[in-house]
């Protein structure tokens, strides 16, 4: 397990300042499918055990709720959809808690939103397995230079047009 984290951190440090512009985008892609570049590649075709699609591993029904595009293998389209989903989930979290999520909480909003909400957004009540994975995301996000994440920061940039 440590070896995998060190490998991801090494890759992250290798391209953090070159091709990529978003620590959040990069950390999510790396933790979900191992995508180590913002460019299209094999990671964009990974289908998860429950049918999750794109480099960000989005459930197909959730994808369809946010876009009519079927182009989930396009990293730009997938990122646009991811930001929309996260903006909604962060907004719900902020209304419930009165604050923005920490990076570890952001990952729980991404990967286990129902579980996290079900425990009242209390990190100490989250399953140890989920919390450990969220901690790995947090560490990777910080390694990539990530800072605070707020709902406005997820939606301020204009979204690229999603092609069907």
Image (tube, helix red, strand yellow):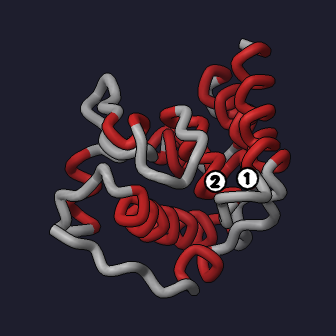
* Mark 1 neighbour class, 10 Å CA radius: few under 14, some 14 to 19, many 20 or more: many
Viewed as shown, does residue 133 lie left or right of 41?
right
Residue at horizontal 50 percent and vertical 41 percent from the top: 111
| The quarter of the displayed image where residue 62 is located | bottom left
Q: In this view, does 6 lie above or below 139?
A: above
Q: Mark 2 points at which residue?
A: 106
What x and y, as percent, mark residue 58? 35, 46
What x and y, as percent, mark residue 150? 67, 73
Viewed as shown, does residue 82 lie left or right of 108?
left
* Mark 2 neighbour class, 10 Å CA radius: few under 14, some 14 to 19, many 20 or more: many
Q: Do the residues labelled 2 and 1 touch (CB within 8 Å)?
A: yes
Q: In this view, does 153 lie above or below 121?
A: below
Viewed as shown, does residue 130 lie left or right of 148?
left
Foreground of the two, 155 or 40: 40
Residue at horizontal 76 percent and vertical 52 percent from the top: 16
What x and y, as percent, mark residue 9? 78, 34
Q: In which quarter of the image is the N terminus?
A: top right
Can the viewer see residue 119 in this picture?
A: no
Q: Distance between the residues labelled 2 and 1?
A: 5 Å
Can the viewer see residue 156 in this picture?
A: yes
Q: Is mark 1 on a helix, strand or loop?
A: helix
Viewed as shown, does residue 126 lie left or right of 85?
right
Foreground of the two, 46 or 154: 46
Residue at horizontal 42 percent and vertical 69 percent from the top: 80
| The quarter of the displayed image where residue 136 is located | top right
Q: What element carries label 2?
A: helix
Q: Quadrant of the C terminus?
A: bottom left
What x and y, as percent, mark residue 4? 70, 19
Q: Which mark is residue 103?
A: 1
Q: Residue 73 carries which label?
A: none
């Amino acid at each position: 397990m440590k070896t995998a984290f060190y490998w991801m951190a090494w890759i992250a440090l290798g391209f953090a300042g070159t091709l990529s512009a978003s620590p959040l985008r990069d950390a999510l892609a790396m933790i979900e499918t191992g995508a180590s570049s913002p460019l299209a590649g094999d990671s964009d075709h990974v289908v998860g055990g429950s049918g999750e699609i794109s480099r960000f591993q989005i459930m197909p029904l959730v994808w369809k709720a946010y876009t009519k595009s079927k182009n989930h293998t396009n990293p730009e389209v997938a990122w646009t959809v991811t930001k929309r989903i996260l903006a909604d989930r962060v907004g719900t979290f902020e209304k419930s808690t009165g604050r923005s999520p920490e990076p570890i909480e952001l990952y729980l909003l991404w990967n286990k939103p129902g579980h996290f909400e079900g425990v009242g957004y209390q990190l100490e009540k989250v399953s140890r397995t989920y919390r450990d994975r969220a901690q790995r995301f947090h560490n990777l996000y910080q390694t990539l230079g990530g800072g605070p994440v707020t709902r406005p920061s997820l939606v301020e940039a204009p979204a690229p047009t999603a092609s069907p």
